[in-house]
Amino acid sequence: MKILVTGGNGYKGSVLVPKLLDKGHYVRSIDTNWFGDYLKSHKNLDKIVCDIRNLNKSHLENIDCVIHLANIANDPLVDLNPQLSWEVNVLGSQLLAQLSVEAEVKQFLFASSGSVYGVSDRPKVNEETPLIPISAYNKTKMVAERVFLSYQDKMHIACIRPATVCGVSPRMRLDVAVNILTYSALEKGTITVFGGDQIRPNIHIDDICRVYEFFLGKENQIKSGFFNAGFENISILDIAKKVVSKLPHCKINILESNDPRSYRQCSEKLLKYGFKPEKNVDSAISEIIETYRAGNLNKNNTCFSVKHLKSQNIS
Ligand SMILES: NC(=O)c1ccc[n+]([C@@H]2O[C@H](COP(=O)([O-])OP(=O)(O)OC[C@H]3O[C@@H](n4cnc5c(N)ncnc54)[C@H](O)[C@@H]3O)[C@@H](O)[C@H]2O)c1
């Protein structure tokens, strides 16, 4: 297939694009490269440095499927410049959807977020659960989902709501729960946990990439809609304990939290369609430790998205 990946140089994108190329797909990656360029040259890869707010019809030419990852991708990043985030996450996304329809793209996969559910004490948060987005980031995702679904009469749309992703990537993110706790244990011998009781769903980076691959070409088998993608609901404290079980010299320090987000994601819908996760939080922790010890973990400034984007003065 010919696939356009926006955000191809991001945390997920830089793992996903090589996997797609290995499967024989042609990939066009569009990214501003705010965090660097991690994609090696390949005969079936076109890398375009472009802001999704400036897309034109040539970017969509001959594309069968769009995997849309390019966004301002978490709460604190969005809070740096909410106006920019509404422009990128919603208006840029609408432009991409419109151009995709005009180019007769068959399938559109959107990386929404499980955080659209906000705070919920329901034992099972599934796709029917009402959304209570509490941050500007959550709100941009919720609105963008509605924009995309308004095009479902023209192309197949899957709004995938991933849990927090964990594991190693060339464009490493050290601002997501499992990664930061493991990194902190390795670097400082201490893990600081804020609150700790909040339950959050998790998904391994290889599994979320496999979720996107799972949808490819299934536009006639899976109805357009929303799809949770998170397979391990665990508290932050339990993640810290998993890290300590692999690094027993480390200590856990618990501080008060001002972040109430807590929810359990249920991904039965995706499982019923036949998707099977292959990895988990434990595998992510082990892989981060292994990569760190081998001296191959990317831990430069770009891995701390907020600090990095603040220094770049992006607008
Ligand atoms: N990582 C997670 O835990 C997680 C969980 C749920 C949803 N998501 C969603 O998945 C997607 C990818 O997340 P990620 O973790 O890879 O984030 P990331 O920040 O590492 O990647 C985003 C990429 O998009 C690019 N980008 C941002 N704005 C752009 C623009 N205007 N034009 C072109 N490129 C632009 C950035 O340069 C970056 O390479 C995001 O939409 C995010 O909201 C991520």
Image (tube, grey):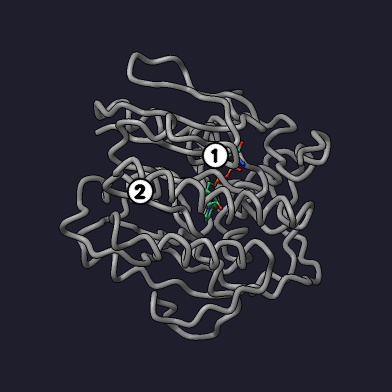
Labels 2 and 1: the sequence-earlier one: 1
- Quarter of the image with the N terminus in it: top left
Q: Residue at x 51, y 48 (%)?
A: 95
Label at residue 185: none
Nearer to the camera, 30 or 177: 30
Asked if the residue under mark 1 is in contact with the one under mark 2, i.e. CB atoms within 8 Å, the reply is no
Q: Which image quarter has ligand 1?
A: top right
List x then y, in percent, for residue 29: 46, 30
Measure the alpha-carbon separation of dots 2 and 1: 27 Å
Ligand 1 under 8 Å from disc 1 Cβ: yes
List x then y, in percent, for residue 118: 59, 74
Looking at the rendered structure, the kind of residue marked 2 is Val
Q: Nearer the viewer, mark 2 or mark 1?
A: 2
Tell me which corner region of the image, top left, top right, bottom left or bottom right, holds residue 235: bottom right
The residue carrying pointer 2 sits among few (fewer than 14), some (14 to 19) or many (20 or more) residues within 10 Å by Cα, namely some
Looking at the rendered structure, the kind of residue marked 1 is Tyr
